[in-house]
Image: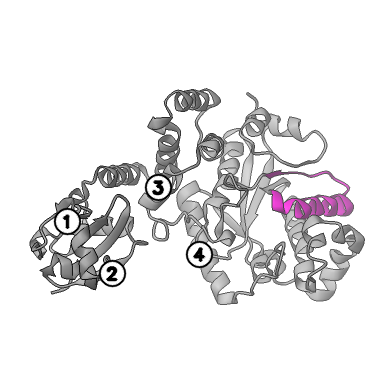
Amino acid sequence: MTLYEDLKWRGLIKDEAGENLKEKLNEGNLTFYWGTDPSADSLHIGHLSSLLTAKRLENYGHKPIILIGGSTGLIGDPRPTTERPMISKKEVLNNYESLKIQIKKIFGYDTVNNYDWSKDINFIDFLRDYGKYFNVNYMLDKDIIRRRLDTGITYTEFSYMIMQALDFYHLFETKNCVMQAAGSDQWGNITAGIDLIRKKTGKEAYGFTMPLVTDSAGNKIGKSTGNAIWLDSNKTTSYELYQFFLNSEDEKVIDYLKIYTFLSKEEIEEIEKEQLNHPETRIAQKTLAKQLVTFLHGEKAALKAIEMSEALFSGHVKSLTKKEIEDIFKDMPKFETKEENIVDMLVNSKIASSKREAREFVSAGSITINEEKITDLDKQITKEIAIEDEILVVKRGKKKYFIGKITN
């Protein structure tokens, strides 16, 4: 397939701008840019699809420029509902430095900062050199602006479009950057930049958007929705990343394989066929999860995540270290206990609501501690049965986990 055909097959092109964009993409040798504002100190999965698309373009001969918006990050692009909270210059700078290191480490890309060329533009020059090229009616017709008119939008947010268009124009003039690629929520800003370039230079520029990655309910996978999966392994561990994609919905997992991996069309179609014939193997989810963890955190981290996942699934928690258990169960209920009788421990840790209920759990064989099913009501919980003399993985029933720590 050509590059354009591959991008379309993977579902990575939604909107297109510029005459003969298809031919330009297939010819190679375009300089293009993708940008993000430093609103956090790590990128998340929502960013990853765009950066992988940049890598696909680079592999085909195009030259990427990765922009981190030190100036636009101080303003914040308009959201569909309410204005973004302002973040301090110190926080923006800290986030910028973190993203700069992260992007270099994962993708090998150097970055540019739009603060470098916008910080010295005074207000009068901004209005004369850029503002005069933007018709207010044109700006009001942009989807993201139109959706905010009923609730209100500040002049600061309203100006964001001009600032991003300025970035495209600056990169066009200084780095021969003729194309911008971004998520579909940036379509209005991309076309604004193309229009500014045409009005100021008489030349043509290009752009395309990628659909935002969503789950089957249409919810965006990204930081703003509260379910962020970070690329930084200190914020989202390799195990958490692996589990997130291992639990991908059947109806979305093939789409995710197309978006998030470099597997070929033939390889993905073979996986899809095997998944349909043997869904119990979850081959698509396992392939996706391993590919992503390997790309982001390395093969060693991916193999360890698989080992941890299989140990938990099979109930072999004793093979895990204290740190691995803490990573796996960090969102599970925690409790501290002293060496005591099983019934007292279950009540004191609130795993059972009363001694009567605790006895019922134990007598029914519903309580497992570090792989050992507890049926003896006189069982003493001591450091001898704990992992590293401290950790207790308590399972009540089939799925309810509690993590205990013996403190005495």
Mark whose residue sits in front, 3 or 1: 1
Distance from disc 4 to disc 3, alpha carbons, whole Å, reads: 23 Å
In the image, residue 307 above or below residue 272: below
The part of the chain drawn in magenta is 184-210
Task: Say which label, 3 or 2, has the lower sequence index.
Answer: 3
Measured from the top left, where is residue 99 in percent x and y?
52, 60
Residues packed near mark 4 inside 10 Å, few (<14), some (14 to 19) or many (20 plus): many
Residue 212 belongs to magenta span: no
Distance from disc 4 to disc 1, alpha carbons, whole Å, reads: 50 Å
The figure's colour scheme reads: one colour
Q: Label 1: which residue?
A: 363
Q: Are marks 3 and 1 in contact (CB under 8 Å)?
A: no
Image quadrant assignment for residue 148 = bottom right
Check disc 2 and give the amino acid type: Ser
Check disc 3 and give the amino acid type: Gln
Mark whose residue sits in front, 2 or 4: 2
Check disc 4 and give the amino acid type: Asp
